[in-house]
Amino acid sequence: MGPVELLHMSVFSQSFSPCGRFLAAGNNYGEIALFSLSAALSPEATELNQKPILTFTAHEGPVFSLLSSDSQLLSAGNGEISAWSWNELTKKNVKPLWTKRPNYKSSLEIPEINSMAINPRDNSLVFGGGDNNIHILDLEHGVFKSVLQGHSDYIHCVNVREREGEILSGGEDGTVRMWDSRTGQSIHRIEVYKYESCARPQYGKWISCLTTDSDWMLCGGGPSMSLWHLRSLSPTSIFPLSGCQRQAAFVQDMILAVGEGAFVSHCLLGGEVKAQIPCTPQSLNTLQLNTNSTEHRVLTVGGSSNHIDVFTNLSYRAFSLSF
Amino acid sequence: MSPSLFNFTDAKDKFTASARHAVAGKAIKPLLNSFNQIPGNETEKKTTLDQALRSVLGDQIVEQKASCDDYLSLIYLSIQAVTEGICSATTPFQLLGDILDCLPLDLCDRIFSFVEENVSTWKSNSFYTAGKNYLLRMCNDLLRRLSKSQNTVFCGRIQLFLARLFPLSEKSGLNLQSQFNLDNVTVFNKNEQESTLGQKHTEEKEDGMEEGEMGEEEAPAPCSIPIDYNLYRKFWTLQDYFRNPLQCFDKFFWMTFLKFSDETLAVFKSYKLDDMQASKRKMEELRASSGEHVYFAKFLTSEKLMDLQLSDSNFRRHILVQYLILFQYLKGQVKFKSSSCVLNDDQTAWIEETTKLVYQLLKETPPDGDKFANMVEHILNTEENWNSWKNEGCPSFVKERTVDDKSKRPSRKRQAPEDFLGKGPDRKIFMGNDELTRLWNLNPDNMEACKSDNRSVDQKSREFMPSLDEFFAEAIEQADPVNMVEEEYKVVRNPNYGWRALRLLSRRSPHFFQPTNQKFKSLADYLDSMVSKLAKELPKDIPSEEIKTGEEDDDDNGDNLLKDSNDSPSIQSKLVTNQQMDDIATKLGAQWKTLAPFLEMKAVELREIETDSEDVEMQAKLLLVAWQDREGTQATVESLATALNAAGFSQIADGLSEA
């Protein structure tokens, strides 16, 4: 990979292995790189340990979403989903377990898949993308169970409310919809841009980040990032972050958000921004916290650069992994 | 009857017994009594008493039944004895030394408190000279026994006591050579073998191999949190530079220091600390319960603590202040720095930049960051004074009373003006400088000069501001392309002329104030344009020659005013010629010295003339030449004749006038 390609690389997705010792990252060239966290974090780590142990081309188009189940790594490319065994990957075997493609209505365009989530209740994979629909794939049997239609524009992000088994989706049309996975019906629809407190017409109405922990939901994008109480479906706090947030996460009693701007924002639940920690990439696309392992419990962020910043302590950047 | 002999053993026994009594009774009387009773010489008795007291103490210690108070009362007794004059002044100190040597540390603590309390006694005249060395030795012995990290407070007390006892300039307490404590090494885990985390827990490893787990050859040592080894190592390596700042002058070490510092300070910058109001309350509760501050003499450098240390504001302040102290040393003038220890420009620039960053970080560090930063800055500024004190070799601060000199009237180094002004042969005013004298004497009376309207050529009338046409006439003529004057010769190029021209224009010409869009590259160009404007306005039929002869208003002549060039032939008196001077010199001969004062020659010049030549005629000639040089155009026959007449050489004067 030449220097020009490296310059134009963007990291769109990340996922930690179930054991927590490896990080998989997907970029805009369709490649997935595997990094060994244990080697990078060890006392005798060198520059070499910050390079991937394995890089392979997974899809033709950019890898917008990566997800790990108990033993598999699922990656979404141009209209298709591939599954890889983590075991095999660590042994540098890059043959996918399976690749599936849902039935798209038109065969002319191949819609990209933007986001995936696993519904643990019925072991199904929920994903949405460019065709404005949410597809559900049964992971056990490998068949596409249903299609949830309702959004009028492409879907940016999906998430699953574990306790209730509901699916949340946010899209370009500015709505956040809640679906019942069994009936396939849309239960609620929130038009975030219609709420004056969050609306930012200068940025648009699209929702690019959505995360939930059953009672609360964080959503942001064109409108300001806001914390919603799902029972009452009302916004409780608005976060005064400039730029559009692309991914957010609940960490302990804080909210971490990344988006436009070369920093990770730490926010308190009340709505104030506590800190903004500078990072290498100029704008960030993805944020992941490694909850699978305590000794490798790091925060990694990636964005419009071939570097992935690793934070051992949430308040400063320790080092960077690079493609 | 011979005086009774002094029996040492006897005396000693008696003293010992009475000392014991005195200690028991806590009064000095028994001792005084026995001292007075025993026959013998003062010195002998004193030394015997010393011995006796020491043996009493020795017995007390050996018996081990005595308590601290008993020891202290014995010492107190000895102090009293010294005051009474029955015991030599060194005894209390020797006793103290003995006690501290023989007791365990916790008891030493109490004895030392006694020493501390009586510091005023030790400083008093009778005790100080005798005892200071003993005290110093005693304290040093104690310090050697104590551990800096465990008995920090006791060590501190001893140091403070020494500081109070000795004056500031006491040489034994000073670090005269400005040396560094190179032993203060900060130990940290440099490689994985030393790491305390290196122990592998084998049983955990096996449990970890579950299904779906990645098998690895070497499972890393399990620790509960991820550790940034990179920062850890770089951070603690910095301490080595603070320990030995001279390393910074070496190029390679400096680069490493730079790199590591930049990284560390970047971490501090991005990791902003909260103002922990809530935790402050907890801290105060904690403090109240434990009762004492805990001080650490050395940094704790375990990797696991790194995160906690980074989030601690006190720790951060320590490091930042270390930086400031280091920078002050590197920049400062210390006499003992070798000549190779100089900073180059890059280093100085980096230090300036980083100092600003460090102060900013200090201000951001809660609580009360601003106040703390200001305080540190102030303290470091005062350090400069101490630094210069050290550079001077630590002089004593005691002001010695100086012997009163008779205050002399300051003698005049130079003559008062009234002494030399207006004392010349024709009431000339000597300004001390030839040129000034000439200028001043053009017309010594200022009022006359101001009133004079004289337009005769030899006497210049006063110059006033010229009119535009007069001043610019030459420039106008030069600007005329017919005359084909080359650019570089034009008078407008002369900066002097240009400046005067501007002044004149600002006073006289309305063109000066008209705004114009033209941009002029130089003054000369501007003047060219002004000259052309003026040329159109002014009457053109004034011939230039007339203007040129008018000496008063042509500025060129203004320059000449300062030059020695008034060579107009119609001068009233003639200048003395060389021939005339030769004649006079021959006639004067050795008597030239008599003439000298009338020619207003200074003694210095006379001496010069004497040394210049042996021949008296030559000397006379030199005198006259010197006079002529000084006078310049005023070196007239008349003035010389006047001087000769005044000196009594009227014949020579006549001879001169006739010629």
Image: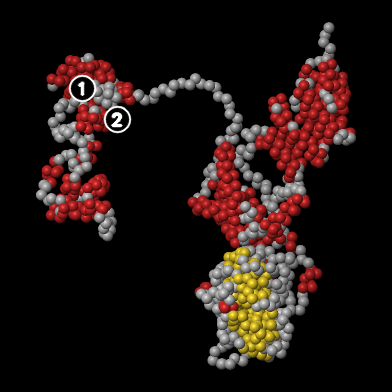
* Residue depicted at 84% across the width and 34% down the height: B69
Residue A79's quadrant in the figure? bottom right
The disc label shown at residue B640, or none: 1
Quarter of the picture containing the N terminus of chain B is: top right
Total labels: the figure holds 2
Which of the two labelled residues, at mark 1 and mark 2, occupies the earlier sequence position?
Answer: 2
Front-most of residues B291 and B360: B291
Horizontal and vertical percent for residue B584? 20, 20
Quarter of the picture containing the C terminus of chain B is: top left
Front-most of residues A3 and B113: B113
Chain identifier of the residue bearing label 1 in the image: B
Callout 2: helix, strand or loop?
loop
Callout 1: helix, strand or loop?
helix
Q: Is residue B621 visible?
A: no
Residue B122's quadrant in the figure? top right
**Mark 2 lies on residue:** B433
| Residue type beneath disc 2 | Asn
Examine the rendered structure and indicate whether residue A191 appears above or below residue B125.
below
The disc label shown at residue A71, or none: none
| Residue type beneath disc 1 | Leu
Examine the rendered structure and indicate whether residue B559 appears above or below residue B645.
below
Residue placed farthest to the top in the image?
B1
* Residue depicted at 79% across the width and 36% down the height: B111
Do discs 1 and 2 share a chain? yes
Examine the rendered structure and indicate whether residue A162 appears above or below residue B259.
below
B1 lies left or right of A322: right
Q: Are marks 1 and 2 in contact (CB under 8 Å)?
A: no
